Image: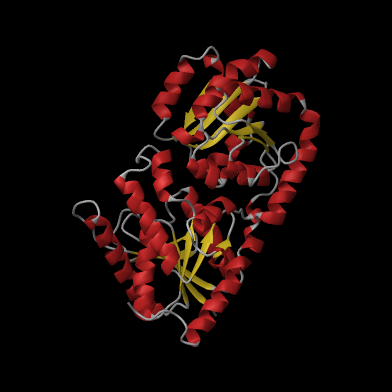
Amino acid sequence: MTRVLHVLDHSLPLHSGYTFRTRAIMKAQAALGLDVRGVTGLRHEAPGPAAAEVADGLLFHRTAGAAGGPPGLREWREVARLADTIGQVARDWRPDVLHAHSPALCGHAALQAGRALGIPVVYEIRAFWEDAAVGNGTGRAGSLRYRLTRALENAAVTQADAVFTICAGLRDDLVARGHAAGKIGLSPNGVDLSLFGDPPARDDALARRIGLGPGPVIGFIGSFYDYEGLDDLIDALPRLRQRHPDAALLLVGGGPMDTALRARAAASPAAQAIHFTGRVPHAEVERYYALIDVLAYPRKASRLTELVTPLKPLEAMAQGRIVAASDVGGHRELIAHGITGALFPPDDPAACADALADLVDNRADWPAMQGRARAHVAAHHDWAENVSRYLSVYRHLIVRRANGDLPAAA
């Protein structure tokens, strides 16, 4: 049985898009007969000193301690501690492959341990973290930190035995930097379709408690980052209500932009039709999805949104929801305009409003669009199928290891 140790920034039981993708990969691999475990670095912030933890039936080893010091030195100490933990687990469990997931710190820790023990390393990029930092307001494009993070990413890609990205945008960017296209595979964002049966019925009591009326509900469920463009969605609502006076906006979640968005909504001419719920328990999220007629994803145009495909639209499509999204590269990889959803120009509240109004006008087309969207997810984004993309790469690297063809210890 092939053993794969996934090297991670953080994991379940924490909830994030990152941990949900990890869970989907590991569950799908286990279903195919692989033996899988995870190991997390120091940025997995969770209570308790446990060296290992089972979450949702998956085993995760933890890196203990802390890493101090000035920026740069602190990160290298993180890498060293994670590499030590990988080595301890690997010497005991003897994995066939180390599969590291971005950020690059995880990649370099896996490379240190892998080279020392002669274990092949796969490095998977879910986003360029320097661009993600710009997108969430914690970094600046072109800064020293930005350039160093990019250099670490390039080094991890160069040294890894194989590389995956989650979308064509990321792969094309790496190729443009000079990395060999043949080394980089695609493992697109996906969903576990077995988790999506018939969506729950609309909870009228919940709708009344929030203040929703009978009119069309436009909604967003997720984290409130600036790049998500929720300010544009709020600004679009008054124009949408010119054509559909009873339309409402439901924003479920929270994040860095929460206070600013609430203030913007309070100042809107349509303030009475904008509803915030705050964060809700993950187990309750489906009840809120059931209140929404159109899921809107108005991401702003940026390097991050042009290159990276989000997970939320796929989950909405898998649930048979109508999806409208800004016309950025990450959305174009997922949604065909007029076929599986609607696309509108980014950073343009008026265009967003018009696209949403057109969708509401054409409700008769929704069942066909919903069917096409779910069929697209089933054909191209079902983890039960997509996870097989890893297997041939794993087998190739295991054979190379057996033949002594992998790089020797540094």
Image quarter where the N terminus lies is bottom right
Tell me, yes or no, if residue 224 can be seen here.
no
Q: Kindly give the residue lying farthest to the bottom in the view shown.
A: 403
Residue occupying image coordinates x 61% and y 42%: 331
Residue 340 lies in quadrant = top right
Between residues 298 and 53, which one lies in front from this camera angle?
298
**Frontmost residue, 132 versus 275:** 132
User: In the figure, is residue 359 to the left or right of 221?
Assistant: right
Q: Where is residue 294 drawn, in percent x and y?
A: 65, 32
Place of residue 287 in the rendered image (x, y in percent of width and height, measured from the top left): 59, 37
Determine whether, in the image, residue 74 is placed left or right of residue 357.
left
Q: Is residue 69 visible?
A: yes
Residue sitting at 49 percent across and 86 percent down? 402
For residue 353, above or below residue 325: above
Number of numbered tags placed on the structure image: 0
Picture coordinates of residue 129, whole percent (x, y)? 41, 49
Q: Is residue 375 above or below residue 86?
A: above
Colour convention of the picture: secondary structure
Q: Is residue 47 left or right of 95 when viewed as pictured?
A: left
91 over 178 or under it: above or below = below
Residue at (71% x, 37% y) in the render: 337
Q: Tell me which corner region of the image, top left, top right, bottom left or bottom right, holds residue 159.
A: bottom left
Q: Quadrant of residue 373?
A: top right
User: From what the image shows, is residue 270 above or below residue 309?
Assistant: above
Q: Position of residue 320 (x, y in %)?
A: 70, 42
Quarter of the image with the C terminus is bottom left
Between residue 177 and residue 37, name the one nearer to us. 177
